[in-house]
Amino acid sequence: MNVSNIYLVSLLGLLPIAVWLYAQWDAWRKSSRPKLLFANTDFNTAVLSRCPSLQAVYHSCKFLTLGQGHVETILRAKLAPSPGVSYKREILLLECGGAVALDWEQGEDDGVVGLPHDAPIFLILPGLTSGSTEPYIQQAVAAARRAGMRAVVFNSRGTSDSPVLTPQIYSASYTEDMRQVVSHALQRYPQCLLFAAGWSLGGNILINYLAEEGEAVAIAAALSLGNPFDLVVSNHHIKKGFNRIYNASLTASMRRIVAKHSAVWRNWCGPAGAALPDAIKQVKSIRQFDEAITVHSFGWSDVDAYYAGSSSSSRIPGVTIPLLCIQAADDPIAPAAAIPYTALAANPNCVLVVTPTGGHLGWAAAPVQQYQQRLLSNRAAAEDLLGDAAAGNAVECCQQQQQQQQQGAGIALHVTEALRWAF
């Protein structure tokens, strides 16, 4: 073997070490405390003091920080384990003639083993085309269970085999289904506090609903994770570079939902009188799907008006209950540029947490001082969430309603802290 070959073999032998060292360095430089943005009120200070992990150093995982959030996003979606949650499905018929599927965690007597009848309800809104079978949703259900909450997953029309009875599925702005789900949950458990959490597009729908309800909202506190917020910005972002892979994947999922229930659209006509099969056949992106289906199903003049009018970024001022928003700075689907920083900072009910990494609903890292790191597993630290969950107790209130809201916010923020590390 000549000298050049020996040199080449030596370089190849050092390559894995160099890659490992680079991955270690990249994770180290991207590890920092999450950025917190909130109004400096006694209540926010008290609640955040009970959520130490939201203020501790976020230790990004080596190798997962590579690829500008893509590696963490994809591995989380493909390799995340499912805790094997069992559900009892309830089909809720809606006033418009449609229906949605509510999946309640399965237990004895149609409830959950060990939970009191007045345990708080934790309403979960999955992301676009997702539902109760997704690992990240099942992990949220398991985390809520350990926190002493009764979880129920709101599967939008067509998702997770939810029935489609009318030529309409769901959109980023349509909140009437949510309104009827909330009413039904509280009729079933009238004595319970109700919390809600939305992932990705579910977070956008949730915030739109909260703002529309205003002071009359029946939810005590809410969580939003990986929210695209400004749909104009987010849709523009998802059409760039590698993000087009996500665009194509989500579009294919939406096409499958419509195709599976094509009989419902038998007499439906889209743009220029095109029948559904012809309209769907041409769809290659989320924007094209919305142009062909969504804007016509929900009465928008065009897709640009739909995106502008459906963005929860413009609804933040109308939120009247404690709301915690968690975003990742490297999210390729819900980009940091879409976050309404000014509006969130101006609303004393809102707290924004931005982690340095995490991808889209990835968040595989956790503060090693507080949690045992176990990559891509359910590490929700929820054992003691309800033991001292009423962070509002640290703030003196003389009205019972205020105390209940603060307790709700304390519990919700603690659950979010747990769910935050479930990714």
Image: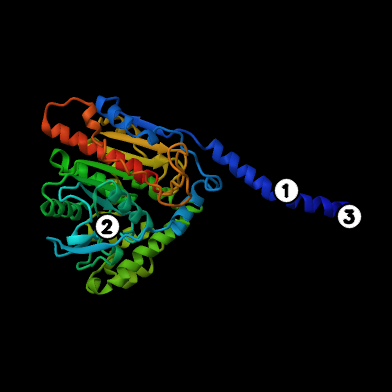
The residue where tag 1 is placed is 14
Does residue 14 appear left or right of residue 126 in this picture? right
Q: Position of residue 334 (x, y in %)?
A: 39, 46
Name the residue at 67% across, 50% down: 16
Q: Position of residue 375 (x, y in %)?
A: 48, 50
* Among the two numbered marks 3 and 1 on one chain, the one whose residue lies closer to the N terminus: 3
Q: Which mark is residue 2?
A: 3
Asked if residue 259 is positioned above or below residue 357 in the image, the reply reads below
- Label 2 element class: helix
* Among the two numbered marks 3 and 2 on one chain, the one whose residue lies closer to the N terminus: 3
- Label 3 element class: loop
Between residue 280 and residue 19, name the one nearer to us: 19
Q: Position of residue 139 (x, y in %)?
A: 35, 53
Q: Which mark is residue 400?
A: none
Q: CA distance from mark 3 to mark 2?
A: 69 Å
The residue where tag 2 is placed is 295
Quarter holding the N terminus is bottom right
Q: Callout 3, which amino acid?
A: Asn
Local crowd size for mark 3, using a 10 Å CA cut-off: few (<14), some (14–19), many (≥20):
few
